[in-house]
Image: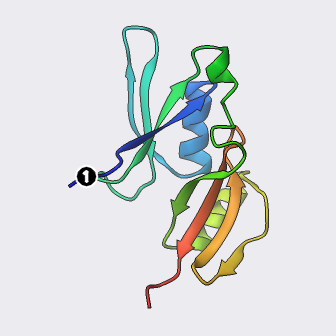
Amino acid sequence: MRRIALVTLVVDDYDEAIRHYTQALGFRLVEDTPRPDGSRWVVVAPDAGRDGSGLLLARAKDDAQRGRVGDQTGGRVGFFLHTDDFARDHERMRAAGVTFLEEPRHEPYGSVVVFQDLYGNRWDLLQPAPAP
């Protein structure tokens, strides 16, 4: 079996990123381990279970990486957060101050809304339509 385990997300600050992903987006902190070079191995993940994929929150180390914070996909939606209860998660995230870029839409493929994370990266919150 193969799967994508982690995707790196370059951030400005570990602690503010942890707060945003755990408090505003409802992720859980999977790991926060100091490394010998002063960096940290920080992994957050949605609450879907231990075998799903997660985000490695990596603090930018230089100007080139700092220039990518918030623009890792050139302004496109680059991350897709699936949910089994769109209304619940949309309301919880809205109440937590998450910035939504549009009103929720109900498409043939499911209910969806585009939001921004703390740094401006674009995400879809998506509840896929049931399979026919």
Q: Quadrant of the C terminus?
A: bottom left
Q: Secondary structure at mark 1?
A: loop
Q: Quadrant of the N terminus?
A: bottom left
Which residue, given by chain and number where applicable, does mark 1 sit on? 2
Q: Extreme left residue here?
A: 1
Query: Closest to the observer: 27 or 125?
Result: 125
Query: Closest to the observer: 105 or 22?
Result: 105
Q: Extreme bottom residue here?
A: 132
> Where on the picture, by quarter, is residue 89?
bottom right
State left or right for residue 56 relative to residue 88.
left
36 w.r.t. 122: above or below = above
Q: Residue at x 52, y 81 (%)?
A: 129
Q: Position of residue 3 (x, y in %)?
A: 31, 52
* Circle 1 crowding by C-alpha within 10 Å: few under 14, some 14–19, many from 20: few
Q: Residue at x 64, y 61 (%)?
A: 92
Q: Position of residue 107 (x, y in %)?
A: 65, 80
Q: Position of residue 20 (x, y in %)?
A: 61, 41
Q: Residue at x 53, y 59 (%)?
A: 81
Q: Position of residue 15 (x, y in %)?
A: 57, 27
Residue type at numbered disc 1: Arg
83 w.r.t. 12: above or below = below
Count of marks placed on residues? 1
State left or right for residue 35 relative to residue 109.
left
State left or right for residue 15 relative to residue 99.
left
56 w.r.t. 3: above or below = above
11 w.r.t. 52: above or below = above
State left or right for residue 109 relative to residue 38.
right
